[in-house]
Image (cartoon, grey):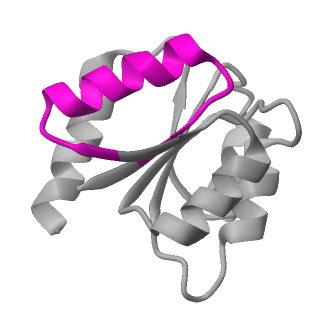
Amino acid sequence: MRVLIVDDSTYIRSSLRTLMQENGYEVVGEAKNGEMAIDLALELKPDVITLDNILPDMTGLDVLKTINTDDFNSYVIMISAVGQQSAIVEAKENGAKHYLVKPFDDSELVGILKELDEGF
């Protein structure tokens, strides 16, 4: 599975990259802001996108609204410190399949990916 990691934190991107690679997933790109995320998502068409909701130039929801077109079929997992129910509902209404609240257990993310992997 090909994964795009979107988070403004270098530490989080590095941690997610390590976690993905250790579990056999290919990280095809990383973005530190919304504009980069949109460009890479549309260019690379990854199987999975991990998407932070708080980015320096826009929200993850803004990214979702922009890339969620008819030909967009990446599986989006929102990962954010923002855990209000309204944010979770809005993310899912705009195409996110899962919403993990930071800090989250690595095994939870790996479990989601393994379930997805069985479908590919």
80 w.r.t. 3: above or below: above
Q: Which of 72 and 17 is in front in this view?
A: 17
- Measuring from the top left, give residue 3's x and y in whole percent: 37, 49
Q: Indicate the quadrant containing the N terminus: top left, top right, bottom left or bottom right.
A: bottom left
Is 66 placed left or right of 10 in the picture? Answer: right
Q: Name the residue: 74% across, 38% down.
A: 33
Counting from the top left corner in percent of width and height, residue 6 is at 58, 38
Q: Can residue 90 be seen in this view?
A: no
Where's residue 15, x and y in %? 39, 16
Is 98 located above or below residue 20 in the figure? below
- In this view, the residue farthest toward the bottom is 70
Residue 78 drawn above or below residue 81 = below
Q: Residue at x 87, y 42 (%)?
A: 58
Query: Which residue: 78% across, 41% down?
Result: 86
The residue located at (12%, 39%) in the rendering is 24
View extreme (right): residue: 57
Q: Does the magenta stretch include residue 19?
A: yes
Q: Is residue 96 visible?
A: yes
User: Which portion, as a residue range, is magenta?
Assistant: 4-27
Image x and y of residue 11, in percent: 52, 11
The magenta stretch spans residue 89: no
- Which of the pair 3/78 is nearer the observer? 3
